Image: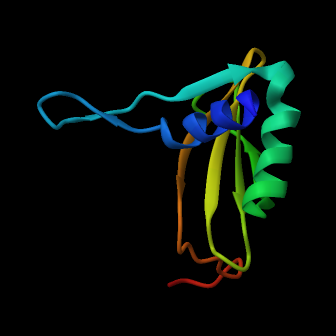
Amino acid sequence: MKYLAFCIVLLFAGTTYAANGALNKTYECIPIVEKHKLIKKLEEEKGEVSLFRAMSRKGPHMVEIFVNPTTKTWTALGTDTLKVCILDFGAQGEVTELGKHI
């Protein structure tokens, strides 16, 4: 139960606002050894599966996007050699075919 509460906090803590209302780009991160537990929670509780994974050109990290094809919720993770961070998440996303422009 304690881990479930931690994951819920983690999922909703990726974006915060300062006292003046400005958006803070702080990310909630966990140790890399806990990544498998986070992915399992995304799969079991959110129904999200890995849709995209790629190495970033901005630094030595990987970006992954998980999507629930039914509810359209999604979560973006950033992973480096030490930690995994929830970069963003949302609902009502749209998956398009490669090569198709909106």
The quarter in which the N terminus is drawn is top right
Point 83% across, 56% down: residue: 43
Please state if 6 lies on the left or on the right of 50 as rendered.
left
Q: Position of residue 102 (x, y in %)?
A: 50, 84
Q: Is residue 42 left or right of residue 33?
A: left
Q: Measured from the top left, where is residue 35 in percent x and y?
A: 81, 31
**In the rendered image of this protein, does residue 72 appear above or below residue 61?**
below
Q: Residue furthest front?
A: 1
Front residue (pair 40, 77): 40
**Which residue is drawn at the image coordinates 65% and 35% (left, top)?**
5
Residue 55 horizontal side relative to residue 23, left or right: right
- Residue 69 occupies quadrant: bottom right
Query: Which of the two residues, 79 or 19, is positioned nearer the viewer here?
Result: 19
Quarter of the figure with residue 78: top right
Pick the front one: 51 or 43:
43
Give percent across and percent down for residue 88. 52, 46
Count of numbered marks: 0
Q: Residue sitting at 75 percent across and 14 percent down?
A: 82
- State whether residue 35 is above or below residue 40: above
Q: Tell me, what colour scheme is on the image?
A: rainbow
53 up-or-down from 16: above or below: below
Residue at the (65%, 80%) spot, across then down: 96
Q: As displayed, is residue 54 above or below residue 71?
A: above
Q: Which of the 4 image quadrants contains residue 40?
A: top right
Q: Give the x, y percent position of residue 79.
A: 72, 30
Residue 30 visible somewhere in the drawing = yes
Report whether residue 56 is seen: no
